[in-house]
């Protein structure tokens, strides 16, 4: 395989199996049918804050509980803490083993919160100010 063919295969595969927080937020805002966002962190992390509407399903419980919680035809998006954590990758692998269509949300919960998207806690839904290191503070699309 040529270097160019290898690069094409590599980047196409990444886009097939990864998504980012902006794309997930856009899908949720548009009400794209069949998207199920799964938070694979433990209870304490979930309680600290999570994506509004996400399903709480720690990685160790996916094999046993996913079939009863997540429709088989769903487009599953997994997330964990952030780019320094591979929990979302492990969760995506568990969903793939069960035959689900699945993508990992790169950036995880950290970038979701840093980009100013809604965070749900027991106290309600809040938004943090946009971090200028992760997204345009003007609220415009980054155009990438």
Image: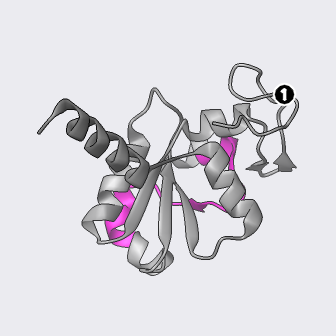
112 in magenta: no
Query: What residue is at 71 percent from the left and 31 percent from the top?
Result: 114
* Label 1 sits on residue: 137
Q: Give the magenta range.
A: 46-65
Colour treatment of the image = one colour
Q: Which quadrant of the figure contains the N terminus?
A: top left
**Vertical relation: 135 (above or below) 59:** above
Query: What residue is at 72 percent from the left and 70 percent from the top?
Result: 31
**Vertical relation: 95 (above or below) 144:** below
Q: Residue 134: horizontal and vertical position, in percent? A: 68, 26
Instruction: Say whether residue 52 is left or right of residue 103.
Output: right
| Image quarter of residue 141 | top right
Counting every numbered tag in the picture gives 1
Instruction: Say whether residue 46 is left or right of residue 143.
Output: left
Query: What residue is at 49 percent from the left and 74 percent from the top?
Result: 74
In this rendered view, identify the residue nearer to me: 80 or 4.
Answer: 4
In this rendered view, identify the residue nearer to me: 12 or 125.
Answer: 12
63 in magenta: yes
Q: Residue furthest top?
A: 133
Query: Callout 1: helix, strand or loop?
Result: loop
Q: Residue furthest right?
A: 138
Q: Residue 63: horizontal and vertical position, in percent? A: 32, 66
Q: Which quadrant of the figure contains the C terminus?
A: top right
Q: Residue 138: horizontal and vertical position, in percent? A: 88, 31
Q: Residue 81: horizontal and vertical position, in percent? A: 53, 36
Query: What residue is at 22 percent from the left and 40 percent from the top?
Result: 5
Q: Residues within 10 Å of mark 1 (few under 14, many from 20)?
A: some
């Amino acid at each position: 395989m040529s270097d160019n063919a290898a690069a094409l295969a590599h980047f196409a595969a990444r886009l097939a199996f990864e998504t980012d927080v902006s794309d997930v937020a856009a899908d949720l805002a548009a009400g794209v049918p069949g998207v199920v966002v799964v938070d694979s962190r433990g209870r304490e992390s979930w309680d600290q804050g999570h994506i509004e509407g996400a399903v709480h399903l720690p990685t160790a419980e996916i094999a046993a509980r996913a079939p009863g919680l997540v429709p088989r035809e769903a487009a599953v998006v997994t997330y964990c803490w952030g780019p320094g954590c591979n929990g979302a990758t492990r969760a995506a692998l568990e969903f793939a083993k069960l035959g689900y269509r699945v993508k990992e949300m790169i950036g995880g919960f950290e970038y979701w919160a840093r980009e100013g998207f809604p965070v749900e806690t027991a106290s309600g839904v809040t938004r943090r100010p946009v971090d200028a290191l992760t997204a345009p503070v003007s609220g415009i699309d980054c155009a990438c």
